[in-house]
Amino acid sequence: MEREIAVMRSVYQTVVVKKELSRKDKIMRIQAAEMSFLRRVAGRSLRDRVRSSVTREELSRAAASFISRGVS
């Protein structure tokens, strides 16, 4: 009986770990798609060798500038 419980715990832990990995994998794929979109908006490609953080920062500044011009 104790052996069966130990086996069930082991199986459960394996399933939980695989579920967490798949969730992380999904998040990484979403972030990659988002960055691909932002690069296209900025007119860049991977070959331009510009850090993602720089692209994000420049686009957020441009968006803030665009919004402030629209409100004024």
Image (cartoon, rainbow, N blue to C red):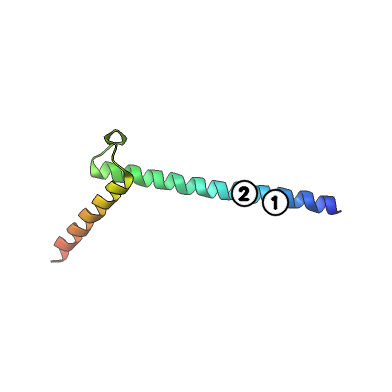
- 8 or 48: nearer the viewer: 48
Instruction: Give how far across and how far down residue 59 sits, in percent.
Output: 25, 51
Looking at the image, is mark 1 or mark 2 earlier in the sequence? 1
Quarter-of-image position of residue 46: top left
Tell whether 39 sits left or right of 29.
Answer: left
Q: Which mark is residue 52?
A: none
Exactly how many numbered labels are in the figure?
A: 2
Instruction: Give how far across and how far down residue 33 sits, in percent.
Output: 38, 44
Q: Residue furthest top?
A: 47
Amino acid carrying mark 1 in the image: Tyr
Q: Residue at x 40, y 47 (%)?
A: 31
Tell whether 45 sits left or right of 71.
Answer: right
In which quadrant is the C terminus drawn? bottom left
Amino acid carrying mark 2 in the image: Val
Instruction: Give how far across and how far down residue 35 sits, in percent.
Output: 35, 45
Q: Residue at x 23, y 40 (%)?
A: 43
Tell me how far mark 1 sits from mark 2, CA to CA.
Answer: 9 Å
Q: Which mark is residue 12?
A: 1
Mark 2, residue position: 17
Q: Residue at x 26, y 55 (%)?
A: 60
Q: Residue at x 27, y 52 (%)?
A: 57
